Image: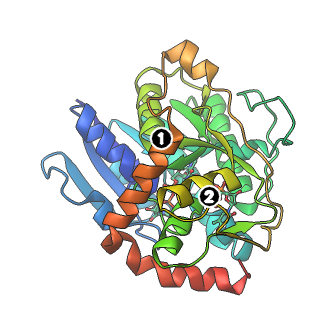
Amino acid sequence: MRRLLVTGGAGFIGSNFVHYVLDNTDDTVTVLDKLTYAGNRASLAGLPEDRFRLVEGDICDGDLVNSLFDEHDAVVHYAAESHNDNSLTGPAPFIQTNLIGTFTLLEAARRTGIRYHHVSTDEVYGDLELDDPARFTESTPYNPSSPYSSTKAGSDLLVRAWVRSFDVQATISNCSNNYGPRQHVEKFIPRQITNLIDDVRPRLYGDGLNVRDWIHADDHSSAVLRILDAGRIGETYLIGADGEKTNRQVIELILDAMGKSRDAYDLVNDRPGHDRRYAIDWSKLHEELGWTPQYSDFSTGIVDAVRWYEENENWWRPQKAATEKKYAETGQ
Ligand code: NAD
Ligand code: TDX
């Protein structure tokens, strides 16, 4: 039994990991989360009180972070400002949370020596051309495009330096695009599903041919737990599930699942600096730690996601109008 501290555990992927750990281990979990617009207490409802606790607070608060590190055996760091579009209209909180927040955690990890796992993204590698046979590997050079991905890249580099200079007991994972239940309605898949529930046509940026490499959030959680348990200190592991799809292909699956015509969507203003394609080679994680994704059928996963948003309107409805108001300001 381990005492785990999970930052950002009220967000989409962090809450998935909390559920996954409580279902699959004997560990106890404390979530440290600021409950920004992206954090949602409802994502943690019903968890066992003897094994789970939520602390509302900021990862940039050194005193709070230090006291929590003293009470735990390991930390898994998910907390972040996570949305590219927000980073283009207002980058300041990305610098604060993603860089200063990670620095604050690393200093506490250095002081206490507890195990630290850092959750990051494939976007640190920049993008690939549509016709490039290459995929990202652990040795691809960093080349981030957006304020979001550059702050994630900076946070990864801080971790690497704290490992090398101070022997912090850290690992890093860089994962591709996640989908599944409890994802904020600002993100592509939930935005389009909830627009369709509201009889609004889906909106694709640019030509709709950008490619994302999709993975179910449960597979991301199982990979992070495997790395926490068995990953080599100082190593980076890429997480993916061979899920490359154009945004048009994704929207067609959503339209099919919701009984609408396949061309019932609009092309709108492109995202500035929009990365063209991401693709992950996850062979290191498979060969070294024996991990394999369980969700191989993306179209079934999309049908499940559609049903989840149809059945959980009380979870997403409070965020919807404010999210669409922000998009209206950029014509997206
Ligand atoms: P999210 O936006 O849904 O959740 C982020 C959580 O962090 C929220 O609960 C928020 O309240 C909390 N938070 C924000 N600032 C904080 C602060 N200063 N102190 C404490 N808590 C704070 O994000 P997500 O999509 O669940 O992503 C989680 C992590 O996974 C991020 O580090 C992200 O970079 C990484 N990641 C995401 C994806 C993806 O597809 N969404 C893919 C790869 C990696
Ligand atoms: O309305 C939309 N229309 C559209 O065409 C939205 C919201 C997005 N898009 C496009 C942009 C991307 O090509 O869909 C794709 C996916 O967009 P997002 O859901 O915003 O994800 P992305 O920018 O790829 O980043 C996500 O994956 C990597 C997460 O938000 C990051 O946190 C993670 O690091």
Question: Callout 2, which amino acid?
Answer: Ile
- Relative to 138, say whether 122 is above or below: below
* Relative image position of residue 142 (x, y in whole percent): 79, 40
- Relative to 124, say whether 317 is above or below: below
User: Which residue occupies 38% across, 54% down?
Assistant: 9
* Relative image position of residue 175 (x, y in whole percent): 59, 40
* Distance from Cα at disc 1 to Cα at disc 2: 42 Å
* Relative image position of residue 219 (x, y in whole percent): 45, 35
- Relative to 105, say whether 83 is above or below: below
Query: Which residue does the numbered mark 2 point to in the structure image?
Result: 251
Query: Which residue does the numbered mark 1 point to in the structure image?
Result: 109
Is disc 2 surrounded by few (<14), some (14 to 19) or many (20+) residues within 10 Å?
A: many
User: Which residue occupies 62% across, 42% down?
Assistant: 176
What is the quadrant of residue 310 in the picture? bottom left
User: Which residue occupies 48% across, 50% down?
Assistant: 302
Residue 32, labelled with which disc?
none
* Local secondary structure at mark 1: helix
* Local secondary structure at mark 2: helix
Residue 70 visible in this rendered orientation of the protein: no
Of 208 and 220, which appears nearest the observer?
208
Of 135 and 250, which appears nearest the observer?
250
In the rendered image, which quarter contains the C terminus? bottom right
Question: Callout 1, which amino acid?
Answer: Ala
Which residue sits furthest top? 287
- Side of 63 where 211 appears, left or right: right
In the rendered image, which quarter contains the N terminus? top left
Residue 63 visible in this rendered orientation of the protein: yes
- Side of 142 where 118 appears, left or right: left
Which residue sits furthest left? 50
